[in-house]
Amino acid sequence: MGQGSFGTIEVMEHFTCFQTATMGTTKLPVGCEGVMYCSAGEGSFEETIDEPGGILNVLLDTNDDENCVLYVGPFKPSDGGVVMEARIKIADITNEAMFVGFQETLNATTPVMCAEFATESFAYNASCGGFAGLQFDKDATTADWRATAGDNQIPDFVCDSDDARAYNAPVNDKWDVIRVELDPNRDTRIYLGEDTGALKLVKSGTAVMADSCLVHAVVMMEHRAVSDTTDLLEVDYFYAKGYRDWTV
Amino acid sequence: MGIGNKGRIEVLEHFMGYSTESAQEALRLPQGKVNYCADSAASGVFALVTDEPGGILQITTDTTDNHGYAFSIGPFAPSDGGCAMEARFKVDAVDDLAVYCGFSETLAAAGPVMPAEFATESFIYNGTGGMAGLQFDADGTTDDWRACGGDAAAAAFDADSDATRANQAPVADEFDVIRVEINPHGDVDYWLADKKNGLRLIKHADSVVTATDVQFAVLMLESRANAAAVMEIDYMYASGGTDWTQ
C-alpha cells in the first residue's frame, strides 16, 4: 500500500483548451492536462476548427531535422507499468519523420529522435536511453510504420527492412492511433490503428530497456529535407498512464 | 438534489505539466490546476524535477526570512458537504523553513500569511480567519508535525508543546503525505503519512472552524533563518461541494 490516496497518474488531453503560440525554447506546457513539449527550431501551435473534438496543430519550420516533441512524464515502468496512446495525422508523408511511444531522455532545447529509418535500416541515436514505439520516416525506401524498442542505441529485436513493419503506412491527412504498453518487467507491446480499423498488435518485445529507467510518453515529429513548406502534424488526443513511486 | 449535475468539485494536480517561466508575482496565478501566490518581495523559482517519476514541482524561495509561497485550491465551504485536501511533498532540509498544510479561510494574494507558526514550545496564530492544518516549524524546540485549528487567532484546542504532536518529524528529502478533512459541522480529522507508513490519524477535533465560512486548501512554505527553502510537490488534491443556494 502506498502512503497516500492517489497512486495512479493519468493524463488525458483532448486539446480542447490550449494557447496558439510560437513554441518556446525550453520545456513548457501545452494544453491543460499535463502535456509538455520541447522543440528544436521552435515552430508554432495552431488550432483546427473544421473538425470536432479539439485538435492541436503542430507546425514545424522548414529546416532539415527541426522537430517538436509532445511528452508526458517521466514514468518508471517498474511502478506498475506505463501506457500511452495518441491519435495523430500527418499532412504530408513526403516531408516528415515520426516517433510515437516512449523515450527515456529528452533534451530541453534540442530533443533527439531515438530511432530514425533510412533506406532499409534503422539508425539509433545517442543520448536517448531506453525507447519503445512506432517510427515512420520519409527517408525509408518503403513508407511504413515500423516498431522498434531497445536501450542505448541497441535494439531489442530485429527492426530493419521488413522485420518490424506494420504493413500499414500513414496516409496524408488520415488519422492513425498508436498505443504502446510497457509492463513492470519492461516487456512492451506496440499497437497501431489505421484510419478505419481497430488497434492491432504490430510487435511485442521483452525486457526492452533497463530496470531503473524513467521514460517519457512521446509524440515526436521531425522535419526531413529543406523545403519551402512547413510540416503539419495534427494531434487529436494524447493519453498516458503510470503509477506513483511511493518509495522515493 | 442540486440545481445541476455537478455537485462535487475535485481537483487533483500531479504536476505533469507546468511552466517554469514565472515564479513570483503578487497575485494568485495558476500553476497547473493549482493557484499560487507569493510574498510580494519574494523572488523564488519553479523548476522541473526530472530524476524522479510522476511529475514533481520544485519551488525554491529566496533567502529572506519569512518569505514564502502558498499553493491553493478553492475556496470551499465545509457546510456544502464537507471538504478534504491531501498533498504529497518533501523539503530539502528541516532546519531553515516552515510548512503549513491544510485549510485557511484567508489567503492574501500579495504576501500570504501562514495562519499558524510554532516557536519554541507554542503556537502563534496570525489572526487570518478559520484554519485547520498540520504545521512544521524550524523555530520549534522539538521538530515535529503538529495539528492546529481555530478561528480568528484563537485556537480551538490545546496545540502547544506536545499536545498535538504527530511524533513523526519531517525528514529532509523524504516525502510526507498530509490529509485534512473538514466535515459539514466544522469538525476536523488530521492525517499524516511518512515514507514508511500509510496515512494515520493524528488528531480529531470538533467544531474547529465555522462550517459556513469558506476555506482554501493550502500548502504553504516559508523560509526561516534567512536561508532559501526548497520544497518538491508530487501532488495536491482538494474536494468540496458546489453551493447551490447562491
Image (cartoon, coloured by chain):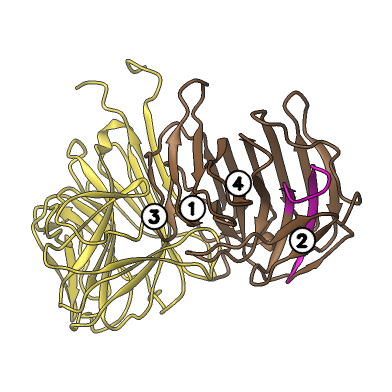
| Quarter holding residue B91 | bottom left
- For the C terminus of chain A, which image quadrant? bottom right
Chain assignment, label 4: A
Chain assignment, label 3: A
- The amino acid type found where label 4 is placed reads Ala
- The amino acid type found where label 1 is placed reads Tyr
- The residue mark sitting in front, 1 or 3, is 3
Q: Is residue A137 magenta?
A: yes
Do we see residue A81 in this rendering? yes
Depth order, front residue of A60/B134: A60
Residue located 49% across and 49% down the image: A61
- The residue mark sitting in front, 3 or 2, is 3
CA gap between label 1 and label 3 equals 9 Å
CA gap between label 2 and label 1 equals 25 Å
Residue ID for mark 3: A24
| Quarter holding residue B38 | bottom left
Mark positioned earlier in the residue sequence (4 or 3): 3
Q: Colour of chain A?
A: brown
Asked which secondary structure carries label 1, the reply is strand
Discs 3, 2 touching: Cβ within 8 Å:
no
Above or below, comparing residue B122 to residue A80 in the picture: below
Residue ID for mark 4: A240
Q: Are marks 3 and 2 on the same chain?
A: yes
CA gap between label 1 and label 4 equals 14 Å
Look at the image and give the residue range highlighted in magenta.
A133-152
Residue ID for mark 1: A37
Residue located 79% across and 63% down the image: A208
CA gap between label 4 and label 3 equals 23 Å
